Image (spheres, coloured by chain):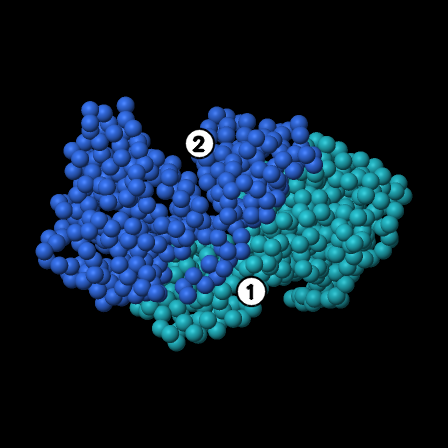
Chain colours: A cyan, B blue
Amino acid sequence: MFDIIPIKGGLNNVEGFFSGGVGVGLKPEGKNDVAFIRTDEPALVGALFTSNKFQAAPIKHFKRYGETFLTNFVLINSKNANAMTGIAGINDIDEIFSSLPITLNVLNPVMSSTGVIGSRLNKTKITKAFELFDFNGKNSDAAAQAIMTTDRFKKEICLKVDVGSGDSFHIAAIAKGAGMICPALATMLCFITTDAKVPQGEIISLLNEAANESFNAISVDGDTSTNDTVMLISSGKSGVWNREAFREALRFLTRELALLILKDGEGSTKTVAFEVKNAVTSEDAKIAAKALSNSLLVKTAIFGEDPNWGRIASTIGACGIVCDEEKLYIKYDDVLVYSPLQKEMSAEIESAANRVMKQESYKICCDLGMGDKSYTAYGCDLGHEYVNINADYRS
Amino acid sequence: MFDIIPIKGGLNNVEGFFSGGVGVGLKPEGKNDVAFIRTDEPALVGALFTSNKFQAAPIKHFKRYGETFLTNFVLINSKNANAMTGIAGINDIDEIFSSLPITLNVLNPVMSSTGVIGSRLNKTKITKAFELFDFNGKNSDAAAQAIMTTDRFKKEICLKVDVGSGDSFHIAAIAKGAGMICPALATMLCFITTDAKVPQGEIISLLNEAANESFNAISVDGDTSTNDTVMLISSGKSGVWNREAFREALRFLTRELALLILKDGEGSTKTVAFEVKNAVTSEDAKIAAKALSNSLLVKTAIFGEDPNWGRIASTIGACGIVCDEEKLYIKYDDVLVYSPLQKEMSAEIESAANRVMKQESYKICCDLGMGDKSYTAYGCDLGHEYVNINADYRS
């Protein structure tokens, strides 16, 4: 038995970690734009990266150390992705790290970047952060601010996990990401710290499992930014390892973060869970749920609060899965809008569905009636703000 | 040797065909909403349909006759797709046809519909058209108007093809479609008539070849509306069959129509050709070109005239094809914005690229440098008008 308790303070609660963020002029108006996370003793790190073929320089740099290894320093910058910068981009990272104070005794330092593709890092500005950082501070909030790009709010979560007999550990994270209309190219970064004693052999598989139900449920397979990164760093300082408790806490934490990222969808006003039930295969259920969450016409109908279930049906029919219009049921929350016996929507049903769509968040459920597999994907609407934000991202 | 000469008058020039369109109140303000195309003697028809699993009732009705067959009557309505209407939707079509004047001697009449999914046809209104049609008229313009939905302009083309020795034939078409942002769910309909004597064994293969280079280059594979239809009807009245001339004329006609549909993209202001060169396989080239034409972030950058080539590169990297950032070249018309030796864009290059992007139409070329296969897809920008049109399509 264990208890998962959300607490305030982000990364600051996790034993063995220091963090902070400062502004060095990458962002306007002195906003925080460079962050660090460090440990007092070497900590185990594992990470999941984008499947984009053009992985950014910081990812290539990370991979030089291997899949999981010991580190004590993570540097993060916003406004510049350091992607498509070739060998020079990787050398820039080494050069930046060579300016870190010797007293930090850095081991295998890693970097993570988000922002515009195709520009070299401004090394002078970034290394200036090393003079401004309070390396012994616990300033999770400042770090969370520094990694934001088009985010409307910072994402910071901490869980305390009691595992009985007075034993407990912490797991916390900061994250950025907001481009859920097209998760394609809007970088998602997430840095998870824990003082649980995660075994090296399990760190990647646990991270994979949690990401599949969270970050992957809000993004398109194989269609990701050059920089997407989810990093898990374990100091082990609590001395506690309870696999089941850690697994549940990690799943809870990543799902909460994924929903925060979705809620912050660029210009979005509503979040919708797309549940596809009773598909022949899990893959079919996932394909259909993601097709719904990514359909522009579904997204604009959500924005317009238009209970046009035909767009839902057509997306299901178009996505290539096994389905049959004589077995399909479509519901908006509890309102049945289509069934084989009720093909036309009455005025009463239409207004009930419209009331569901006026909520900030609701569920659209498609029961395929073909098998017993399910998947839920999460999406948001597409409105004018999305166009405003993306028509000129760089300015 | 043969000459392809565009002429005015649409379907009216093609021997053996009559056509027209009237308004029966499906659209507001008395606009034309029901059209017919008929022949005086039975004519050969072949068609390509959507790959959507939920094919609309008129498509199921068509297929009852077979793949190619003789017909002398096509009825088309807008505002209602007659999709997801089950057996009742098919019976509605038979019932409508039973009201046609006996004097027309209809043989295997077929129907085509576009509009909202999930509502039964208004049979009373549609059959009222039979009292208003001038069945012996040549009113291609009225028919082209009647099939429009969100189209901003009608699409009507006619070609006269001289094949030497005084022989010639005509090929003409009316089409509708404008939802190129998400070809997914915006129906594309195209009715091609010809007096060339097309052999029954070749009608489908010729149509397939032409569609692959035209309508398919502006739409997503397997992600199509419930109603998409391209129909070719041959009266054979010219007595002429010149395979090569017909093939070229059909390719020319369908490519022109596809570009017209693209130009009419919902709310679009620019059309862009995405050429992917020197891919390892033709499939890779096609996947990458289509990924570019469908990327929301590319589309919004085009709208914003922002030469952010990083979004182009990232889309190429994300689409799953074989590529290498050290072999990639990206050009906007003649302006080279990225090459392995020029990873950063100078201010001069950026303003040159920005000038290219101010044009109404231009080309973005990605030379992958991996092989020798190419494909060109066509896309348009995404702006506020798209959101306005699609947030409440049904009203």
Give residue B119's position: percent from left, percent from top: 32, 65
**Helix, strand or loop at disc 1?**
loop
In the image, residue B167 above or below residue A384? above
Q: Which residue is drawn at 13% across and 59% down?
A: B101
Query: Which residue sits at x=52%, y=71%?
Result: A358
Amino acid type assigned to the residue bearing label 1 in the image? Lys
- Spot the residue most to the front: B8
Q: Looking at the picture, does residue B194 appear above or below residue A182?
A: above
According to the image, label 1 marks what residue? Answer: A270
Mark 2 Cα within 10 Å, few/some/many (few <14, many 20+)? some
Determine whether, in the image, residue B73 is placed left or right of residue A92: left
Which residue corresponds to the image point at 28% horizontal and 61% vertical from the top-left? B23
Left or right: A22 as drawn, with respect to A277:
right
Could you tell whether B223 is left or right of B20 in the image? right
Residue wearing tag 2: B282
The chain to which mark 2 is attached is B
Return the residue nearer the eye: A79 or B254: B254
Quadrant showing the N terminus of chain B: top left
Q: Nearer the viewer, residue B60 or B241?
A: B241
Dot 1 crowding, Cα within 10 Å, few <14, some 14–19, many 20+:
many
Q: Which corner quadrant holds the C terminus of chain B? A: bottom left
